Amino acid sequence: MLYLTGRGFELINILLVDDHELVRTGIRRILGEIRGINVIGEANSGEEAVKWCRKQPMDIVLMDINMPGIGGIEAARKILRYSPEIRIIILTMHTENPLPTKIMQAGMSGYLSKAISPQEMVHAIRTVHLGQRYIEPAIAQQIALDQLSSDNNSNRLDQLSERELQVMLMLTQGQKAVDIAHQLNLSPKTINSYRYRMFQKLNVHSDVELTHLAIQHHLINPRPLPT
C-alpha cells in the first residue's frame, strides 16, 4: 500500500484531467492510497478543467495535453490566467523535445510521462506543492543533452513558438482552422497565419506533411488502419 506517515502532510487537493476514463480511474486509485492527497474531482476535457478551477479552489491540476477541444495547453493557459496560484503538472505520453521545454516555458510546474512509477508521481506532486518545479529526470536529462548538443538544429520543431506548437498539435489531430480559432478566441485568419508560418519554418507544404512531421517527433500517435 502506498502511503506516507508520521509527518502530518498538509492536504493537497488535486484535479485529474484526462479524456480516458481508465487513466483517471487508475490515477485516482493510486492517489487514494496516499495520506495527505485528496482527488477533489475529475475532468475529461480542457474545457471542463477550466470550469472546475473557476468554481472550486484546488492546489494542483494533473493534466494530459492531447484531448479533444481546446486541449491541455490552452486549458492550462486559461487556468493560470484566472488562478495563477494553481500549479499544473502535465502527465503525458509525449516526452520528446521541444514539447517539454515549450510547456515548462509556458508556466507549468511539472512535466511527467505516463511511464513513471506511482512513487515518482507522488514525489512530483509533493515537490510542486512546495513551490518547486519538477521535470521527470529522464526528460530533464534529454533537455539538458539537447541544449549541450552541437547539433541543436536537428529538431526543426525548436523553431516554433509555444503558440505555434499548440496550433500544430490541434491541426494534426484533425481539427479545422475555424474550430481552433473558436476554441482559442482567435480569428480563422490568425490561425491560418500560424499555419503558413509553420509551413515556412518547417519546410512543409501541407497539413499532411505537418502531420507526418508530428508523428516523426512523437507529438501524436499514428492512427491505426480500419479493420
Image (spheres, rainbow, N blue to C red):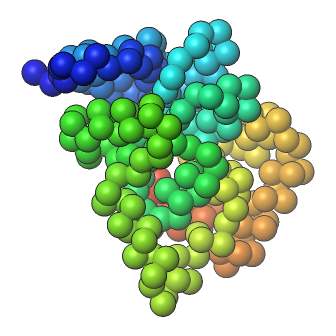
User: Image point 22% across, 35% down: which residue?
Assistant: 118
Q: In this view, does 85 lie above or below 66?
A: above
Q: Is residue 89 above or below residue 197?
A: above
Q: Which residue lies furthest to the front in this view?
A: 7
Q: In this view, does 214 lie above or below 75?
A: below
In this image, 77 relative to 65: left or right?
right
Q: Residue furthest bottom?
A: 150
Q: Foreground residue, 187 or 139?
A: 139
Query: Residue 57 is drawn in which quadrant?
Result: top right
Question: Does residue 125 show up?
Answer: yes
In this image, 58 relative to 159: left or right?
left
User: Image point 84% across, 59% down: which residue?
Assistant: 193
In this image, 60 relative to 138: left or right?
right
Q: Foreground residue, 188 or 160?
A: 160
Quadrant location, the C terminus: top left
User: Image point 42% across, 71% down: which residue?
Assistant: 144
Q: Foreground residue, 91 or 45?
A: 91
Residue 173 placed where, x, y %?
56, 46
Quadrant location, the N terminus: top left
Residue 180 placed where, x, y %?
73, 41
User: Image point 79% across, 66% down: which residue?
Assistant: 196
Residue 17 placed where, x, y %?
47, 26
Query: Residue 11 is drawn in which quadrant?
Result: top left
In this image, 141 relative to 120: left or right?
right
Q: Which residue lies furthest to the left in this view?
A: 1
Residue 108 placed where, x, y %?
56, 43
